[in-house]
Amino acid sequence: MTLGQDSAGRSLKTRLGYLGLAMSAGLLLLAVQLYRLQIAHGDEYAARSVDNFVKKIRLHADRGMIMDRRGEILVDNRPSFDLFVTPAFCQSCLDEVLPRLALYLGWDADQLQHAKDVVKAGKLAGNFQPALIRIDLSRDELDVVNAHRIELPGVEVMRVPHRNYRKGAVLAHLLGYMNEINQEQLERLNDGGASYALGDYVGRRGVESYFEAKLRGSDGMRKEVVNARGEPIPGLSELLAGEDPLQPQPGSNIVLSIDSRLQDEAERVFPGVAGAAVAVEIKTGFILAMVSRPSFDPNLLTGRVSASQMAGLVKDPLQPLVFRPVAQHYSPGSTFKPVTALAALKSGAFSPQTTATCNGGYRLGSRVWRCWSHGHGVVDARAALQHSCDTYYYKVGDTLGLDPIAEMGTALGLGSPTGIGVVAEVPGIMPSSDYHNRKTPGGYTKGMALNSAIGQGDDNVTPLQLAMVYAAIANGGSVYQPQVVRRVESVDGKVIEEFNPKLVRQVDIAPEHQKIVIDALSAVVNEPGGTAYASRLKDIKVAGKTGTAQVARLGSVRVKKESMDYWERDHAWFASFAPTEAPEIAVVVLNEHGGHGASDAAPGAMAIIHKYFELKREDANSVAIEQTAVPEHPSLKAYARTAPPSIR
Amino acid sequence: MQLGIERRMVPHIPWSLIGSILAVSALGIWNLASASRPPHNPVWTNQMINLLVGVAAAVAVCLVDYRFIYRMAVPVYLLNICALLALKVLGPLRLQPAEFMKIGMVLMLAKFFHDDYRPTDDSYGLVRLWRPVLISLVPMGLVLVQPDLGTTMMLLFTASTLILFAKVKRSVVVALGVAGLLVAGIIWNDYIRETPEPHGTLIRQLLKHHQSQRIASWLDPERDLRGSNYHSAQSKIAVGSGGLTGKGWGQGTQTGLFFLPEQHTDFIFSVWAEEHGFLMCLLLIALYGCILLSAMGVAFNSRDRFGAFVAVGVAAMIFWQVFENIGMVSGLLPVTGITLPLMSYGGSSLVSVMLGLGLLVNISMRRHIF
């Protein structure tokens, strides 16, 4: 009997037919899908198959250097071996590869967790982008990673240029530092047309941050044939022949107005544990040196700082992260008196000969405002400034009221940001009657004018503002915008952008008034009995003013009993310029809780001034020698461009 | 028991079937030679040996009368069950019993439907189905706990095809339809439905993570190109980039650059598609079609229900593997670990397919023997 000779067999055969049809239909469906993939979308998939095995490798652009005005390198790059993980190529990364890596390199749990977090974030951001796990691998660590290559898929060590702050803590606040870009910043910068990737470092604070776009340069790109594990496949790169790699464009160099030699001297002679020093060119507003104490090491903050170290920096009562020359304001004390003097003379109510009689104080209403001395006798404008007689200035305050003084101070740049730009600054306070009516309970009263006239009360200045005030007094009323950057240069030294002196405003100071003030300030230093006479220089006539500012204690900071003294000591100021006859440089030194201006600030300022003129002589000699030897030497031209007119 | 081939059997040797099988096998080895070119292991040489073993097995199967095979169905089935149990106890073996289980289950079901035939009541209701369902469920359960979801699915589809082919009552078809809708509903609830709060899932929590991911990525292919959907995406790129005529033997970049996981086993078709293009894919599908239709022919002309059911079972087994494998490689179906018959590297898979083909030839040759 064969199948199909009865009805049941026949029905089986019918079903066989249907089954055959169904299977054919199934195969047809496959053919249709293949048609869709291979014919309808064939080109698209062909393109994707090329992308697939070509890995794009970023060629890091060298970040621009930061140099001082003479071309001495302050910040450059050094090679470092950094550890990266490319999430796409790192199979069972979180569970196996990273723990293995942690074992080999002896990481603790925190470090492992950090690595995991980075890889997780990298997966979201761009799976093929190598994510930076660790910097500065030692030779030994490098060997360990290389030896275990096979067990560590997706892990690679790359030679990456790292930022090198050659002078450590010197100028740290001004230069800034770098750390890893955060997501929000990444999006913002890339929306603006940049091409940052997660794990990239970006400038923080100071020049590094302000000139980020110029320093950064643009990364290049090279294509490499890789397999699905990200391993380069030898001999296949010729597939890409004809495609030139995109070369990285190095960033521009930033040339500061700082003179590194003067800066070093200022650091060396700075008299206290905390405070600031500023040296600025009177005729241009370019800053020559800027000290902020205490400081921090930007090398540490550039990716090497631990959480506890960072917390230590933030909590330190001395606030090492604050850039004191511009970001902290202080009561100026007696260094403010030249402003009051100019306001008095300008008002006409005080002639140079107008006198006040000091018996150790000034009576206003029922209260006596004390002078620091028991009595200066009869003093005129010059003598009052020379001897820093408070009584005279009380009288000025009483006669003029606060507003003419505030007007002069404001015109000279107090109470508003200087516009230095590169670093964040506080505006300081130049109180006026209007200010007090707004801010002080009970509003403005005459007593406030008396306090402000001697630089106390609500007067608050930053060391840089004070330096700019003295510079303006010295140069006859030209208020410049202080600047720290001279030029932006290409790698080969071509000037891309040059910054010229910027005059903010010309303050109307009568030459005879200026002369009285300069004479008085010169007498402070150069005449016996002047408060800074002990610190005078032999060969250079310096004009200056000491200040000893009473301290409203650093409010929130609570310190141990034994250091109480320190926090209650007065701030010591010295504000100066030199030489008296044709002023070139203004120097301000602030020694926080230093004690007295004469003993604890003036010597430092004098040493800076001394060094400035010593350097000036040195430079003049070397230029003379070079000029006779090779007049057309290119480096000389560079030098001539670099050196400020005042030094040449 | 008769051994050997008699003269009168010769006209019934299904040459078209044998020809297509050998053609696909040859293409398979040629393709494997490309898929396993250096620096891969040159596994194609092993596959040649597997093929010889498979052919020898097929010839051996041809030599015995299939009535003997009919008698051996129960022992073979039980032996396979034991092998699966042994695997559970002993751990991984070189042989994959799950591959041979397919043949064992087909034989067992064929024997059942042969014995159970009632001329007066030839269609199966739910009650009468309990034995074939049990016969299928036992191996499925054992393979599932291996765990091998893919082969379980293949067993399920093959058994379902055979049971449906045995003619079931309309009510059973309706019940199956409802079950199908239920599965779709579960998938919808577990993988597609979006609610503001996480909602309870029905089976999702029972699946292994990678299995669950595969279903999810099948439903949404663009979801995570590098993650769970990596296989599917890479294989679609490979297939699609083949275009009309392919990149040429040994020229597949996806293949050469290790982008395809398991490219010499489950994803072997992507290598073929990438290197040889649409036209050769059609050729391969046509050859499979030829094998399947020849198998239908064998069933059509078989001497008894046992032969017809074995032939349909083997055809169903091959069809579902081809359909699922090419379907998954081309992104039509979720990724499961299913080999492509005669093309994928693997001894057990090749020999089990060859055994099935031996059965087909056997049944074909002995169609008129009394």
Image (tube, rainbow, N blue to C red):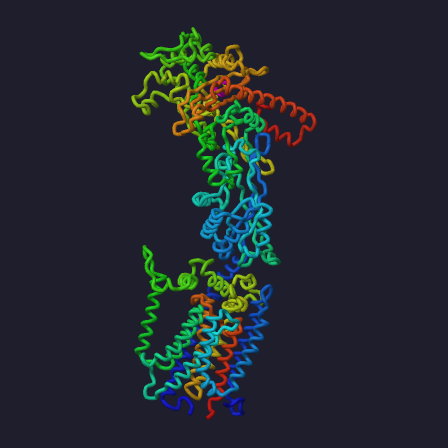
Residue A504 at what x, y percent from top left? 46, 25
Q: Is residue B283 visible?
A: no
Above or below, comparing residue B328 to residue A76 in the picture: below
Q: Quadrant of residue A411?
A: top left
Q: Nearer the viewer, residue A578 or A33?
A: A578
The number of numbered badges drawn on the structure is: 0
Q: Residue at x 32, y 77 (%)?
A: B172
Residue at the far front in the pictured view: A562
Indicate the position of residue A189 as horizontal and vertical percent values.
Answer: 46, 43
Q: Is residue B321 magenta?
A: no
Horizontally, is B173 left or right of B291 in the view?
A: left
Q: Is residue A255 above or below residue A17?
A: above
Q: Nearer the viewer, residue B198 or A27?
A: B198
> At x 50% / y 59%, what residue is drawn?
A48
Res B298 seen here: yes
A512 vs A412: above or below: above
Q: Residue furthest bottom?
A: B370
B312 is higher (above) or lower (below) than A29: below
Residue B258, x across and y down, in percent: 54, 62
Q: Position of residue A495 (x, y in %)?
A: 57, 34
What stretch of residues is rendered in magenta?
A: A470-474
Q: Is residue A471 located in the magenta-colored stretch of the structure? A: yes
Q: Main secondary structure of the magenta part?
A: helix
